C-alpha cells in the first residue's frame, strides 16, 4: 500500500519576494463541538498545503523487492514554498463542514539541498523537559509535563518516518534550569550530551526546558462567591501561558545545532477535577490544551527542518584490514552498494575536553552487507595505511 507523506514548508514572510505568483487553495475541516475557530484554523492550513502543492510538487517513488516480489512501495509527495499575504477570500459552511479558500503570493523556498543524506534516517534521542517552576503545574495537576511533552514529541517524530527516534524522557541534562543550556564556560557546549549520545548511539540529542505554565491572573482562581461569579460571567482573566525552550545538540561534539523558544497563551477552561495530567482527556479538551498541542506540532516540524540539512553520520565500530563495520544499517536506509566518506576523529592533548575535529581521509567505504542495525563493507586501503579505526565516523552528505 502506498504511503503518501506531504512534507510542506510554508514560511510567512513580511518582505517582498522575487518571482512570486498568486495562487488560491481550498481546504476543508469538520466542526467539532461547535468550535468554528478551531475548524477554521485547520481548513486554512489545508488550503495553504493546497497552495504549496500547486506551486511546486516533487513526486518520488521507491519499491523494495524480495525474491522478485515487491514487499514495500512508497510514494512521496514533497513541496517547499514560501507564502506571503495569505488571506481568506471565501468561507462556506454546510452543517458541520467548513470550506475555506485562501489566496497567497508564493515563491520557491530557499531551503538547503540535503543531497543523499535526505534519504537516510538520522538517529535522535529525546530527553526530559524539566519544569522551571513546578508550583505552576498544580493548577490542573500537570506536573507530569516534563516527561509527557517529550514523549509526545518523540511519538510525533516517529510518526513522520524521517528519523530514528529513541526515548530518554526521564533523563535531565541541565543542572541550572534558569540558565540552560549555557554552561559555566559560556560556550553552550554540553559534555553530558556526548555521553547520552554515545550510550544511546544517536547522532542528535533533543532536550529543553518548560519555562512557564502559569495562569495569567492567579486571583481569578479564588474560591469566594465573587470570584466564582466573575468566572461565570467571563470577567476574570482565565488565560494560561505555555513557554518552552527546545534545543537540538550534535551528539558527536555536544555543540548546539538548533535552539528556539515556543510560546502560546489560551483560556484554561477546565472544570474542577476535569484535568489530571498533561495528556489527560480533560487537558486536551481545554482551549489551552489545544493551543499547546498546536505548539508541539510546530516543535516536531522545527526538529525535522533543523535536521534536514545536516549530514548523516554514523560511528565506525570495527576495522579489520580493509573491512569496516558501521553502527547503522537497513533501518537507517542504508543499502548494499552505498558509498560513505570516512573521516578520522581527532582530539588534542591541549584541549581534551574540546570538540573532536574531523579530518577527511579522502577514502570511501562501499557497503556490501547491510543488516538491520549495522552494516559493513570495504575500502580501497587497509585501516592502518590511512589511520581509520574504531570510533571514527562515516558520513553521507
Image: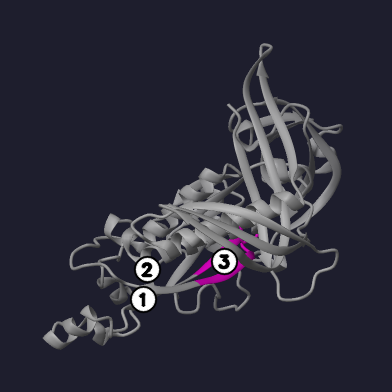
As helix, strand or loop, the secondary structure at mark 3 comes to loop
As helix, strand or loop, the secondary structure at mark 2 comes to helix
Could you tell me what secondary structure mostly forms the magenta stretch?
strand
Q: Which mark is residue 107?
A: none
Up/down of 125 relative to 299, above or below:
above
Up/down of 155 relative to 217, above or below:
above
Judge from the rendering whether residue 7 lies leftward or rightward of residue 196; answer left or right. right
Q: Which mark is residue 240?
A: 1
**Neighbour class for label 1 at 10 Å: few (<14), some, many (≥20)?**
many
Judge from the rendering whether residue 113 lies leftward or rightward of residue 274; answer left or right. right
Give the x, y percent position of residue 292: 43, 65
Say which quadrant the N terminus sits in.
Answer: top right
The answer to whether residue 325 is visible is: yes
Camera-side mark, 3 or 1? 1
Answer with mark 2 or mark 3, whichever residue precedes in sequence: 3
The Cα–Cα distance between marks 2 and 1, rounded to whole angstroms, is: 7 Å
Q: Are marks 2 and 1 in contact (CB under 8 Å)?
A: yes
The Cα–Cα distance between marks 2 and 3, rounded to whole angstroms, is: 33 Å
Which residue is found at the position 83% from the left and 50% from the top? 360
Answer with mark 2 or mark 1, whichever residue precedes in sequence: 1
Give the x, y percent position of residue 134: 32, 73
**Residue for badge 3:** 190
Most distant residue in the left direction? 225
Question: Does the magenta-highlighted stretch encompass residue 247?
Answer: yes
Quadrant for residue 81, please give it. Answer: bottom right
Magenta residues span 245-262
**Residue for badge 2:** 288
Amino acid at each position: 500500500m502506498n504511503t503518501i507523506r506531504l512534507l510542506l514548508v510554508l514560511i510567512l514572510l513580511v518582505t517582498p519576494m522575487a518571482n512570486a505568483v498568486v495562487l488560491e487553495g481550498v481546504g476543508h475541516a469538520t466542526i467539532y463541538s461547535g468550535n468554528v475557530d478551531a475548524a477554521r484554523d485547520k481548513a486554512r492550513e489545508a488550503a495553504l498545503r493546497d497552495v504549496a502543492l500547486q506551486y511546486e510538487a516533487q513526486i518520488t517513488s521507491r519499491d523494495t523487492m524480495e525474491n522478485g516480489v515487491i514487499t514495500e512501495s512508497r510514494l512521496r509527495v514533497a513541496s517547499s514554498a514560501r507564502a506571503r499575504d495569505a488571506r481568506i477570500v471565501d468561507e462556506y459552511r454546510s452543517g458541520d463542514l467548513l470550506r475555506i479558500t485562501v489566496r497567497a503570493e508564493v515563491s520557491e523556498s530557499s531551503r538547503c539541498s540535503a543531497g543523499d543524506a535526505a534519504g537516510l534516517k538520522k538517529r535522535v534521542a529525546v530527553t526530559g523537559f524539566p519544569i522551571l517552576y513546578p508550583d505552576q503545574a498544580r493548577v490542573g495537576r500537570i506536573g507530569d509535563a516534563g516527561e509527557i511533552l517529550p514523549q509526545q514529541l518523540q511519538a510525533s517524530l516517529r510518526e513522520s518516518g524521517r528519523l530514528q527516534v529513541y526515548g530518554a524522557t526521564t533523563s535531565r541534562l541541565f543542572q541550572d534550569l534558569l540558565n540552560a543550556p549555557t554552561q559555566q564556560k559560556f560556550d553552550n557546549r554540553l559534555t553530558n550530551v556526548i555521553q547520552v549520545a554515545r550510550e544511546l548511539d544517536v547522532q542528535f540529542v533533543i532536550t529543553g526546558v518548560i519555562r512557564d505554565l502559569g495562569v495569567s491572573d492567579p486571583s481569578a482562581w479564588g474560591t469566594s462567591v465573587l470570584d466564582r461569579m466573575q468566572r461565570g460571567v467571563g470577567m476574570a482573566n482565565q488565560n494560561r501561558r505555555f513557554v518552552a525552550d527546545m534545543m537540538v545538540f550534535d551528539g558527536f561534539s555536544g555543540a548546539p545545532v538548533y535552539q528556539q523558544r515556543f510560546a502560546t497563551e489560551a483560556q484554561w477552561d477546565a472544570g474542577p477535577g476535569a484535568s489530571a495530567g498533561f495528556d489527560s482527556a480533560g487537558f486536551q479538551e481545554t482551549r489551552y490544551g489545544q493551543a499547546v498541542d498546536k505548539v508541539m506540532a510546530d516543535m516536531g516540524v522545527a526538529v525535522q527542518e533543523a535536521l534536514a540539512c545536516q549530514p548523516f553520520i554514523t560511528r565506525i565500530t570495527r576495522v579489520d584490514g580493509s573491512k569496516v563495520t558501521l553502527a547503522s544499517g537497513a533501518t537507517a536506509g542504508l543499502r548494499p552498494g552505498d558509498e560513505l566518506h570516512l573521516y578520522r576523529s581527532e582530539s588534542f592533548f591541549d584541549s581534551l575536553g574540546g570538540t573532536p575535529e574531523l579530518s577527511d581521509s579522502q577514502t570511501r567505504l562501499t557497503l556490501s552487507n547491510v543488516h538491520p542495525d549495522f552494516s559493513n563493507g570495504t575500502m580501497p586501503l587497509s585501516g592502518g595505511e590511512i589511520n581509520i579505526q574504531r570510533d571514527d565516523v562515516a558520513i553521507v552528505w
